Image (spheres, rainbow, N blue to C red):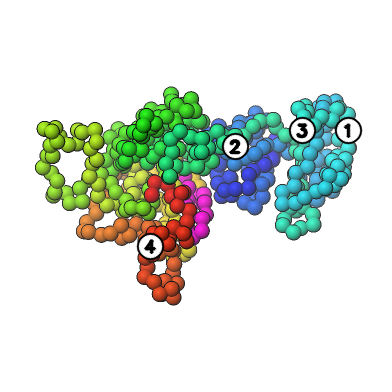
Amino acid sequence: MDYLIRLVQVHGSFRKPEIEAIAEACGLNLEILSYADDSPCCLIRLDSESSARALIHRSVLGKAIYELWGVGTDYAALHADVRRRTSHLWAQYRTCSFRFYVQSYRGKRSGASQLQIIESFSYLGFRGAIQMADADAQFCVLEDWLRGATEPRRVYFGRWIPQTSAREAVNVYDLKKRDYIARTSMDSELALVTANMVLAGPGKVLYDPFVGTGSFPVACAHFGAVTLGSDIDGRTIRGADGVDLRANFRQYGLEGKWAGGFVADLTNSPVRRARWLDGIVCDPPYGIREGLRVLGQRDPEKGREPVLIDGKQAYLQPAYVPPKKPYSFVSMLDDILQFSASMLVDKGRLSLWMPTANDEMEEFPIPSHPALELVSVCIQPFNKWSRRLLTYRRLPDSETLQSSTIHPQKQTEIKGLRNADDLNPFRKRYFERFRSVAETEANGKGPYISRREDAASVGVQNVLSGV
């Protein structure tokens, strides 16, 4: 059967990959018949109405789903398609209560015009009571207009499948209502979408190696997954004044889905090296506010002598802060992929956020690994930069090249005294305002600007997760 999904008109590049991910997570046989980024209407084919309910129930970017009764470029074509597709279904709804309504995307209809459209479906022969609330069957006419057009470019007609979508969870997990957050916490909508992309669900174990205040683990736990996380900054996990990361799970009744958190980074992780994780989800630091760091000494020849505090080893003290050394942005991405390849089960997923510039002057290539297949690339644009949600699937060893044997990742050593911009091309371009060389010279300024000036011009500081 064919169905129509009414999508929200935000995060356009995320919507189709989310539908496909949900279908895989739920084991649905999905075929996408029609989709466009500039339209809220997506036509799909599923095996049954129960499959349609399962799909919309998990969708964050879908508002509603309808059993498709007809589609056309005008009303004459629509009515012809309704007769062709559904004449055998009319008798089922002949005596039940029903409701008709008209929705117009980028267009507007007067009440009289809407009534005329509804009456044009009189050939369906429905004789039951018209009931505006709690009707047995609800039918929708959905018009898709181009801006400034005098008529819709496409018209759809369908029976609403009574099943709420996961959009209600966006409000439930709103950061404004959450007990424990930080400036860099991912907003609830994109966290839930990311959880769908990584196929979070009952019986799965998911890990966030840059857990922060737990936005991703909470979203994955909402869909039934058991989660765990780590962070190089133990303060984010421990919290303060009795409020910590676990408090977020407790707030939503999900404490049983939180396996725990620990202090570590990917280059010094205590996680058992074996392929037992079903998914890895992360928004690693972008290195804007300060350069990227990993655990370790900048100079490995120094700091080897033991440090005692009150006769005890310093590293055993509760307030101990381990030393850190500079870390390359590119090395971090490579290490994430290497770690994922060595930890994910077959078909396990990695969903990774990474920043990029919007111009072509500086290319930030999508990282790759021979054991990981790139499934989708979703883009959230800002002013002069964007961030991408990259989703990978772990390939079975039989499908990887013989020369690409997976070895435990080794920490990339930073040799010499290089500054944070040498190690992070995105950070460098960010503080150049993503200017071209010609723009920089024309403005009479050097490549760098003050952070206060940059914050005012480039903006969007609050979405720089983990920076």
What separation in Å lies between label 3 and label 1 (alpha carbons)? 15 Å
x 29%, y 51%: residue: 327
Residue type beneath disc 4: Ser
The answer to whether residue 6 is left or right of residue 221 is right
x 24%, y 54%: residue: 414
Helix, strand or loop at label 1? It is loop
Q: Which residue is mark 3?
A: 138
**Farthest front residue?**
241
Helix, strand or loop at label 3? It is strand
In this rendering, which labeled residue sits more in front, label 4 or label 3?
4
- The x and y percentages for residue 270 are 28, 35
- The x and y percentages for residue 390 are 46, 47
Q: Which residue is mark 2?
A: 167
- Circles 4 and 3, Cβ within 8 Å, touching? The answer is no
Mark 2 or mark 1, earlier in chain: 1
Residue type beneath disc 1: Gly
The answer to whether residue 326 is left or right of residue 397 is left
What separation in Å lies between label 4 and label 2 (alpha carbons)? 40 Å
Mark 4 or mark 3, earlier in chain: 3
- The x and y percentages for residue 214 are 42, 36
> Within the magenta stretch, is there residue 395?
yes
Depth check: give the residue in front, 312 or 222: 312
Q: Which residue is mark 1?
A: 125
Depth check: give the residue in front, 404 or 386: 386
Residue type beneath disc 3: Gln
